[in-house]
Image: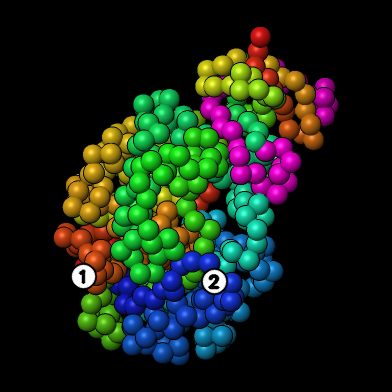
């Protein structure tokens, strides 16, 4: 599988934050949630969490699933 | 290796100075330092300058000879050190080594940063370049975000509370209010810290150090020559530097900085002292959680006890080990490239008994801890009167 379509698979949230003061490159995204995910396949990844509502935000220990890669950045969401 | 002394110090105020450029700040700190050491530029044999991001913040590279020439230091080795927020800590470490090894007698070490010429989103972007670009910054991490994730994990593993973090800010602002050179000379209440604007949850704007302009400088000489410059030399008992991976995701446990532990262990060994002997410290409180981690990683308290220890007042002036009596990065300000040398200057003021309203009762053995990025560089220094 090439890197652009790589699926990092499911994982568990190791830690997270919601960024309010964004850097220049991400001003339009703020506020956004960032997390370090412990991957089921091993290792950790810094990922973005797709969350429109407070309820979709994740916390330490939550299971999350891979959604897609956007410009090399893995996007995850809370597993159902 | 021969004993080394700090024989002069000089600092600018820290703050937002729209009319000042990088070079004039460095010049002011160096002039004050040379005056304090009763020395002239012609006595300086080497110049080490800590600066994190002059090329990005102000568009000027090749900074060490640029500053040196303006200060009348010509024809000597002049080198810039870049190690993120530990840039001038690294410059100090190498300056001490050069004198200790007998390569030079008189070395001038300075640090400078001019940050407020850019808007805050641009500053955040420039600072973020000290993180791992591919691993974390491209995903939208900022330094507040990285330390916020560390804080969340520390709270999860050790029961550290939101209030524990706020206590660091309240204490450091109370200290900084007494520091005439501090950027934000005002006390804040617990309620103010907790209710402030979120930067990266759970950190509010009062958990974050300030974006500042400023410079600091010090002069090093062999202890045996210290009397040529000052009647109050301060001895460098130990200094050590260590490194680690940049990205948090590659660290086994993000609630501890292994580089700090390694540098501390070596500095304690060099100095022949242990954490219990240290009377006061200046630590790298770039974020409130960083001070809690620092007092743990330096061995002042056991891992996980930094929050309750702070809340009990043990790190306040008059407490068991006063930490950041200067106000710390939190209140004094954090012109990143100047911070490492400024911390040493703050130790020297205490050790000489010249800290004015901030003077601590026990002031014969002090420690400074300077951190780069989210722990990829650490410098620990131990000084005595």
Compare marks 1 and 2 and give the one earlier in the sequence. 2
Numbered disc 1: secondary structure: loop
Residue at the image point whose x is 38% and y is 62% from the top = B185
- Foreground residue, B173 or B113? B173
Q: Chain of mark 1?
A: B
Give the magenta range. A1-30
Measured as percent of width and height from the top left, residue B154 is found at 42, 31
Residue pictured at 61% horizontal, 18% vertical: A55
Q: Is residue B60 magenta?
A: no
Give the residue number, with chain letter if any, for mark 1.
B353
The residue identified by callout 2 is B17
Q: Which mark is residue B212?
A: none
* Front-lying residue, B267 or A38: A38
Up the image or down, B383 lies above or below A36; here it is below
Q: Residue at x 59, y 33 (%)?
A: A18
Residue farthest to the left?
Answer: B361
Measuring 64% from the left and 73% from the top, which residue is drawn there? B62
């Amino acid at each position: 599988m090439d890197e652009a379509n790589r699926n990092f698979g499911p994982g568990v949230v190791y830690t997270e934050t919601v960024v309010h003061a964004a850097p220049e490159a991400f001003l339009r995204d703020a506020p956004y949630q960032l997390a370090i995910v412990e991957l089921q396949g091993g290792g950790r990844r810094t990922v973005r969490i797709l969350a429109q509502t407070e309820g979709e935000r994740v916390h330490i220990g939550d299971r999350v699933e891979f959604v897609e890669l956007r410009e090399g950045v893995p996007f995850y969401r809370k597993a159902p | 290796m021969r004993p080394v002394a700090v024989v002069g110090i000089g600092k600018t105020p820290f703050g937002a100075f729209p009319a000042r450029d990088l070079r004039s700040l460095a010049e002011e700190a160096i002039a004050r330092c040379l005056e304090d050491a009763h020395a002239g530029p012609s006595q300086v044999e080497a110049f080490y300058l800590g600066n994190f991001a002059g090329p990005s913040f102000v568009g000027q590279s090749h900074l060490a000879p640029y500053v040196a020439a303006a200060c009348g230091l010509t024809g000597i080795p002049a080198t810039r050190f870049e190690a993120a927020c530990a840039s001038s800590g690294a410059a100090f470490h190498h300056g001490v080594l050069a004198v200790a090894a007998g390569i030079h007698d008189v070395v001038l070490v300075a640090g400078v940063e001019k940050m407020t010429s850019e808007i805050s989103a641009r500053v955040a972007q420039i600072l973020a370049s000290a993180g791992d670009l591919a691993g974390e910054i491209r995903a939208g991490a900022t330094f507040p975000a990285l330390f916020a994730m560390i804080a969340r994990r520390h709270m999860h593993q050790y029961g550290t509370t939101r209030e524990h973090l706020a206590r660091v800010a309240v204490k450091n602002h109370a200290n900084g209010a007494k520091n005439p050179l501090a950027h934000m000379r005002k006390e804040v209440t617990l309620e103010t810290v907790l209710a402030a604007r979120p930067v990266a949850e759970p950190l509010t704007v009062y958990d974050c150090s300030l974006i500042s302009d400023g410079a600091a400088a010090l002069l090093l000489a062999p202890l045996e020559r210290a009397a040529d410059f000052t009647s109050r030399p301060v001895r460098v008992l130990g200094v050590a530097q260590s490194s680690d991976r940049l990205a948090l995701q590659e660290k086994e446990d993000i609630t501890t900085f292994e580089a700090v532990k390694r540098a501390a262990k070596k500095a304690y060994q060099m100095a022949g002292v242990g954490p219990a002997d240290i009377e006061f410290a200046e630590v790298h409180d770039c974020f409130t959680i960083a001070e809690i981690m620092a007092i743990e990683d330096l061995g002042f308290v056991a891992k996980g006890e930094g929050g309750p220890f702070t809340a009990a007042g043990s790190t306040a002036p008059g407490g068991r080990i006063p930490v950041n009596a200067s106000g710390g990065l939190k209140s004094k300000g954090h012109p990143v490239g100047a911070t490492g040398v400024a911390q040493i200057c703050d130790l020297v003021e205490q050790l000489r008994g010249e800290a004015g309203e901030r003077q601590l009762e026990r002031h014969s053995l002090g420690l400074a801890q300077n951190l780069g990025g989210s722990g990829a560089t650490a410098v620990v220094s131990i000084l005595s009167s």
